[in-house]
Image (cartoon, rainbow, N blue to C red):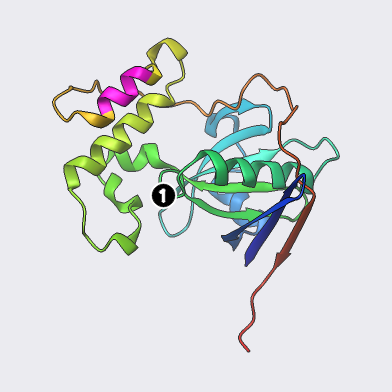
Amino acid sequence: MAIVIKDQTDSEQATQVFESLLFRLSTLRVATVNFAEANKLGEGGFGAVYKGLLPDGRVIAVKRLLNSGQGLGELKNELLLVAKLQHRNLVKLLGVCLEEETMIVYEYIWEKWQDGSALEIVDPALGGHYQRSGLLRFVQIGLLCVQENPSDRPTMSTIVVMLNSETVSLRAPSQPAFYMGNGDKAATMSVNQVSMSEPELR
């Protein structure tokens, strides 16, 4: 399935295409043990996030968007946020569920960091043309930036130093939170259209 989002601001029009997977609600219920409170990772302005385990062994984070009547509007905002603020290979969007409620499914990077397989998130298009230690350092810096306690997060100037110097030692990150802000739904962007379609061969 491809998700195409058109963001119109003034006379500009930008289109983002996300190749994605459509998840069944029943699959996500099984993965999260029916959205058990024990699997709840956090809650923010867009909704609650649950940890889950897919039948193929992948650990995921499932965000249940709040049922405030906006529906596709919230989904569009969330997908645009992912496109604009996150590198697609740091927290990978795995798919969406559009059945009884709207949900977004992400790869759960913390699990990969913990078990020493963080390099599995690297885009295969790089073809091995990278330094393993450099990529692991970038993932570690990213995890430090999303710590639950804001005082545990590095400042922007510290981040610049960490990115530009391999001699600066990094502390080990603790499990990150899924922080979505203070719940203020005001946005500085305008989303006007969304279409979801499954590409067909011609």
Q: 64 or 84: which is nearer to us? A: 84
* On screen, residue 93 above or below 202: above
Q: 43 or 140: which is nearer to us? A: 140
Q: Which residues are magenta?
A: 157-162
Q: Left or right: where does residue 122 sit relative to residue 66?
A: left
| Disc 1: which residue | 89
> Can you say which quadrant of the picture contains the C terminus?
bottom right
* On screen, residue 4 above or below 116: below
How many marks the image carries: the answer is 1
- The residue depicted at 25 percent of the width and 64 percent of the height is 127
Residue found farthest to the left: 167
Name the amino acid type tagged 1.
Answer: Asn
* On screen, residue 131 above or below 51: below
- The residue depicted at 46 percent of the width and 14 percent of the height is 150
Judge whether residue 137 can be spotted in this image. Answer: yes
Q: Secondary structure at mark 1?
A: loop
Task: State the image coordinates of residue 15 (x, y, percent, origin top left).
Answer: 65, 57
- The residue depicted at 27 percent of the width and 23 percent of the height is 161
160 is within the stretch colored magenta: yes
Q: Hey, which quadrant is residue 46 in on the image?
A: top right
